[in-house]
Image (cartoon, rainbow, N blue to C red):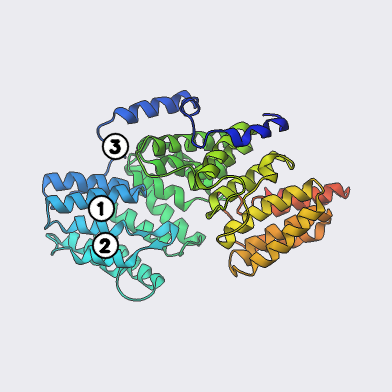
């Protein structure tokens, strides 16, 4: 770990990860980089999905399907469109294109693009292919997204029933079940999907979709251990898919395997920086990598990856219009406990969307409260109150928690932290780093310790664990 004095160098770190830093990762990651650089065909796993497409189109279709199973949607789209070009009468190629516009786990869907894609599809050449096309037409029919997702899942249930030996039918049915939650986690439904994916994984251990959907189905602390085998396998099944490398860390994080979290996300960013998939210095992958570094006390590594994100979207004193730099900055401040360093005191002015502003304010206010700067902390509280009103969803829940945490830290009174913990208990359990940055039960435990109430503090720490 570096000393607090090292923070003065923070803003001098280059704005992108240097070649020397990238090549200082573990030896296994360097090998992966070298192999990827020379590979002619992306290594994405194995599927067995015969179709009526001519061989040249089928080759691109299979590659697109492999990318699709690893949620590498832009790469999948490119392959499916190439299959369409080679064999314009190949209905399944248009099915594949339409499937790239729906992202069930993330509750994202471009219905207009999906409808346009499937509308181009010619008549299917086989009954099985017609069933796939009909299912995706239901997905992009009229009505609300939730209604169409339900119709699609019912169609996939019928398809899976009529073709019990078709692994793709089983897995896309499992994925449709995960999508029924509309971005939330309905545990019984997720467990149903997990059982289907596990069955396919047992018979096809090199199938990327099987391993991937097992991980998503059990992506919570209570069930994560069930998916550990799939998580260990997925990175080797699809070594050239960035999302495959990252997704393993969901299980590792839930189980507290911090070295594995870091390795998975270092590998992911290598793939992104090597150009295999789109990405950048900010976003989901860097946020998770920074969090892993912080859990291991690797503050210098955390600072460098934070700076790469921060400087890609703005520098000190400039407006940052998206949340990732603000999230990573707040996480660094809380877990480094450097309340007076430049990361904490030279922040961008909160503006743009309310979520970004709340994270920027929280980082500034929490640090000020912890260094007993009540003037700055009080000003931040007033600003947070105003911003919270602008966002009735995030602001009224997670924003309110962060606001109450700043108040509790400023006053050293447990009641605001207790209220924050109460709100937090009513929200879905996060399947990653804490959304509020500082877990409220953890803060409450620390305040109770300061009040010389160790038994009550232990109860809060155990609850948070």
Q: Dot 2, how many residues are within 10 Å of its Cα: few (below 14), some (14-19), or many (20+)?
A: many
Which residue has dot 2 on it?
Answer: 159
| 351 and 408: which is toward the camera | 351
Q: Dot 1, how many residues are within 10 Å of its Cα: few (below 14), some (14-19), or many (20+)?
A: some
Task: Name the N-terminal-most of marks 2 and 3.
Answer: 3
CA gap, disc 1 and disc 3: 24 Å
Q: Which mark is residue 166?
A: 1
**In the rendered image, is residue 298 in sight?**
no
Pointers 2 and 1 in contact (C-beta within 8 Å):
yes
Q: Secondary structure at mark 1?
A: loop
**The quadrant where residue 430 appears:** bottom right
Residue 181 percent across, percent down from the top left:
46, 64
The residue at the far top in this view is: 27
Task: Name the N-terminal-most of marks 2 and 1.
Answer: 2
Judge depth for marks 1 and 3 and give the one in front.
3
Q: Secondary structure at mark 2?
A: helix
């Amino acid at each position: 770990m570096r000393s607090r004095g090292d923070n003065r160098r923070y803003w001098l770190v280059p704005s992108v990860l240097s070649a020397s830093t990238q090549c200082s990762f573990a030896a296994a990651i360097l090998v992966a980089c070298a192999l990827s650089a020379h590979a002619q065909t992306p290594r994405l796993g194995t599927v067995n999905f015969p179709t009526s497409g001519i061989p040249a189109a089928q080759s691109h279709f299979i590659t697109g399907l492999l990318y699709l199973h690893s949620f590498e949607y832009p790469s999948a789209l490119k392959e499916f469109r190439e299959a369409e070009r080679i064999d314009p009468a190949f209905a399944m190629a248009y099915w594949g294109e339409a499937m790239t516009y729906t992202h069930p786990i993330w509750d994202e869907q471009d219905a207009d693009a999906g409808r346009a894609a499937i509308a181009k599809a010619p008549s299917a050449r086989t009954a099985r292919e017609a069933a796939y096309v009909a299912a995706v037409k239901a997905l992009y029919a009229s009505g609300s997204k939730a209604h169409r997702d339900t119709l699609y899942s019912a169609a996939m249930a019928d398809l899976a029933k009529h073709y019990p030996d078709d692994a793709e039918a089983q897995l896309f049915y499992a994925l449709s079940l995960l999508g029924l939650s509309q971005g939330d986690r309905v545990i019984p439904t997720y467990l149903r999907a997990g059982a289907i994916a596990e069955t396919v994984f047992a018979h096809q251990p090199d199938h990327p979709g099987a391993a991937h959907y097992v991980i998503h189905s059990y992506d919570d602390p209570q069930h994560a251990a069930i998916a550990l085998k799939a998580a260990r396998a997925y990175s080797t099944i699809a070594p050239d898919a960035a999302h495959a490398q990252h997704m393993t860390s969901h299980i590792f994080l839930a189980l507290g395997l911090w070295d594995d979290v870091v390795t998975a996300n270092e590998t992911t960013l290598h793939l992104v920086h090597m150009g295999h998939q789109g990405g950048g210095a900010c976003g989901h992958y860097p946020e998770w990598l920074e969090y892993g570094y912080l859990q291991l006390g690797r503050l210098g590594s955390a600072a460098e990856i934070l700076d790469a994100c921060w400087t890609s979207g703005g520098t000190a004193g400039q407006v940052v219009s998206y949340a990732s730099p603000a999230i990573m900055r707040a996480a660094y401040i809380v877990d480094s406990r450097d309340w007076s360093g430049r990361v904490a005191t030279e922040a961008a002015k909160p503006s743009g969307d309310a979520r970004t502003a709340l994270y920027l304010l929280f980082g500034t206010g929490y640090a000020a409260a912890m260094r007993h700067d009540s003037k700055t902390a009080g000003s931040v509280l007033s600003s947070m109150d105003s911003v919270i009103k602008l966002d009735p969803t995030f602001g009224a829940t997670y924003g309110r928690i962060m606001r109450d945490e700043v108040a509790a830290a400023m006053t050293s009174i447990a009641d605001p932290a207790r209220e924050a913990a109460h709100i937090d208990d009513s929200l879905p359990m996060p399947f990653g780093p804490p959304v509020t940055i500082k877990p409220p039960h953890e803060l409450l435990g620390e305040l109770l310790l300061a009040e010389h109430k160790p038994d009550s503090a232990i109860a809060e720490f155990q609850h948070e664990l």
